[in-house]
Image: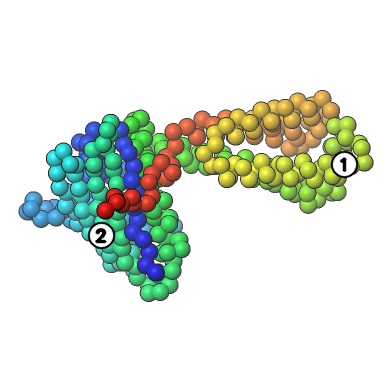
């Protein structure tokens, strides 16, 4: 069964000329499009001919994948604009051999429906098709949608694409760090090694010497583990950072009242809770107005016949 073409559509509240400029000017295009690190237009002696261009994508470790393409833009007046393109790569590292697609700019109430549809052929035979279907194509579709939303934020809110990328990375680091801390604290000292970790004595310090310390510890560990997972599952939930900050402050106060001797030990509740509160503040601030692929339509809706 052949893979479906990649389709992405987003509504952008902005002027047609501005959207056209940011998508058709190479040095501006490469600023918001995650798929390309370099786009270069070649000289075009005859304006009637398609615009040839070179593109490159950095893939890490100093390596990059290069290719070529050509595009033709059409202005259809009130009906909008279309930019059709073909692309190919002779780079042996490129999974894409050749492909084609288009961009459409359709005027709508208060903005523009900006959409793309493209498909390509892969190299490396059957293994290449399997990798494309299971991994490469879903990632490429997500990168297209994420980039479209980054472009939307640039036009609608004036958020520079570089700032969007920096904030997305800061948010990801803060969220993953908070999640892993909770997951580790719940899983390792409370669920896997409760006898050796000293957590049982800590619970007794809170006045929970009821003979069921291990059961209470297992419950607490499960809650902490689940709370950490929530940060990964609900990636866009900013309020989790606020909840985390409040919880850490309350736990710090409770520890100071019940077991103040803990605060003179290495890596004590004060240092851990302070770091978690700081991460929560950083994550809360960075999580505002981030690009997300969820703001895009990923399936083409065909009109009824």
Asked whether the viewer can see residue 79, the reply is yes
Determine which residue is flagged by label 2: 100
Secondary structure beneath dot 1 equals: helix
Q: Position of residue 169 (x, y in %)?
A: 48, 42
Q: Is residue 109 above or below residue 225?
A: above
302 relative position to 184: left or right = left
Q: Is residue 256 left or right of residue 82?
A: right
Outermost residue on the bottom side: it is 125
Residue 106: x and y in percent read 24, 42
Classed neighbour count for the residue bearing mark 1: other residues with Cα under 10 Å, few (<14), some (14–19), many (≥20)? some
Q: Residue at x 16, y 38 (%)?
A: 78
Residue pictured at 54% horizontal, 42% vertical = 235
Depth check, front residue: 149 or 11: 11
User: SS of the residue at dot 2?
Assistant: strand
How far is mark 2 from mark 1, CA to CA? 64 Å
The answer to whether residue 75 is left or right of residue 220 is: left
Number of residue marks: 2
Q: Find residue 213 and name its label.
A: 1
Residue 217: percent from left, percent from top? 81, 43
């Amino acid at each position: 069964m052949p893979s479906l073409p990649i389709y992405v559509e987003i509504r952008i509240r902005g002027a047609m000329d501005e959207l056209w400029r940011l998508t058709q000017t190479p040095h501006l295009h490469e600023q918001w499009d995650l798929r390309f690190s370099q786009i270069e237009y070649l000289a075009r002696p005859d304006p009637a001919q398609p615009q040839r261009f070179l593109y490159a994508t950095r893939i890490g470790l100093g390596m990059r994948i290069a290719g070529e393409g050509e595009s033709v833009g059409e202005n259809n007046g009130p009906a909008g604009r279309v930019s059709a393109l073909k692309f190919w790569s002779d780079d042996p590292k490129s999974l894409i051999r050749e492909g084609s697609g288009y961009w459409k700019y359709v005027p709508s109430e208060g903005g523009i429906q900006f959409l793309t549809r493209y498909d390509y052929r892969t190299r490396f035979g059957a293994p290449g098709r399997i990798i494309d279907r299971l991994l490469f194509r879903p990632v490429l579709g997500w990168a297209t949608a994420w980039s479209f939303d980054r472009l939307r934020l640039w036009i609608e809110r004036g958020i520079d694409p570089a700032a969007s990328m920096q904030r997305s990375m800061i948010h990801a680091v803060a969220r993953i760090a908070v999640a892993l801390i909770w997951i580790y604290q719940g899983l390792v000292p409370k669920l896997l090694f409760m006898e050796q970790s000293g957590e049982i004595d800590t619970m007794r310090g809170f006045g929970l010497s009821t003979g069921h310390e291990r059961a209470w510890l297992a419950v607490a560990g499960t809650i902490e583990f689940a709370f950490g997972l929530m940060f990964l599952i609900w990636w866009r939930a900013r309020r989790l950072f606020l909840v985390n900050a409040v919880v850490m402050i309350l736990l710090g106060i409770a520890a100071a009242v019940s077991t103040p001797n803990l605060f003179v030990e290495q890596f004590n509740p004060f240092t851990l809770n302070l770091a978690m509160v700081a991460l929560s503040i950083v994550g809360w601030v960075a999580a505002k107005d981030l690009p997300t692929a969820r703001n895009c339509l990923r399936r083409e809706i065909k009109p009824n016949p």
